[in-house]
Image (cartoon, grey):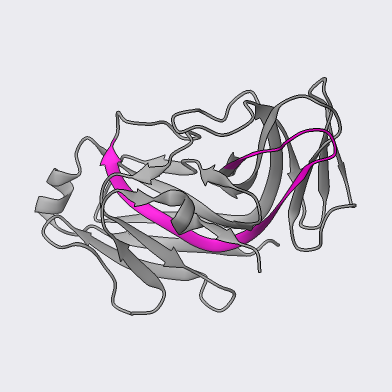
Amino acid sequence: MPDSYSITVDLNDPDTLQFLKGKSLRVYKSVRTGATGLPVVWFSQSVFGHTVSLGWTEQYAGYVTDGGNPVPGMTVKDVSSEPMKLGQLLTAKDDGEVDVSNKGVAGAITVANKGTRDWMCGMGQQVNGELAPICAFDLGGKGEQVIMEPYEKVLLVFESSAQVDTGTVIAEAISASLTVELDGEHRSRTVVFRKSTGWTTNTAGWATQNDSDLGLADALIVPTA
């Protein structure tokens, strides 16, 4: 069975729940790569109780879609996507067909361009039973490839429900946010959000409070060693 990860968000405060009406909790996911790109809104939630549970698994996909260089505000849609295991390669043809083979880079999702079509590409990870994109990169021309490794860090931010949809390419988190790191020994974390104090945690070292207008590429696109 694939490993599962989770974050519990404590919202147990009447003033906080009132403040969050009309807002969504947006979740972004990190990736390690040598390519230059941007995160997309991985998933969001707009119905809140005293706690919110977020969960995902180590199940992945690769995708291509028209667009080339990702631009803030674009939405990843009409994709050619396939479930993939780490170490596999997704090859895109000009007709939109994709093939998956075991010829990729170990520990990574690799996407390659077999033709000359201007593709935008990325990887996805399973959440709420679906494989959803987490990032977007320009695939480049014939023979080019993008190599992406999973990195268990997520960014949480409350923002207006009307601003963007899931799958939208985003450059900045407008509101204050929290980045949370997980690993093989710590697959579950609990964090707190209050209207008066913002994001807090009970343990230092695995979470970072971020000011507003945070550049998401710097926070979530982790360079390969």
Magenta run includes residue 142: yes
Identity of the residue drawn at 29% across and 48% down? 213
Q: Disc count in the image? A: 0
When the figure is inspected, residue 121 is found, relative to residue 195, above or below; the finding is above
Identity of the residue drawn at 89% across and 52% down? 102
Identity of the residue drawn at 60% across and 61% down? 223
Identity of the residue drawn at 29% across and 72% down? 201
When the figure is inspected, residue 41 is found, relative to residue 151, above or below; the finding is above
Which is more toward the observer, 10 or 76?
76
Left or right of residue 47, residue 218 in this image: right
Q: Position of residue 133 (x, y in %)?
A: 58, 41
Magenta run includes residue 223: no
Q: Position of residue 18 (x, y in %)?
A: 13, 44
Q: Position of residue 120 (x, y in %)?
A: 65, 33
Left or right of residue 38, residue 63 in this image: right
- Looking at the rendering, which quadrant does residue 2 occupy? bottom right
Left or right of residue 172, residue 102 in this image: right
Q: What secondary structure prevails in the magenta region?
A: strand
Which is more toward the observer, 143 or 75?
143
Q: Quadrant of the N terminus?
A: bottom right
Q: Quadrant of the C terminus?
A: bottom right
The magenta-colored residue range is: 136-160
When the figure is inspected, residue 172 is found, relative to residue 185, above or below; the finding is above
Q: Is residue 134 visible?
A: no
Q: Position of residue 222 (x, y in %)?
A: 56, 60
Q: Is residue 199 visible?
A: yes
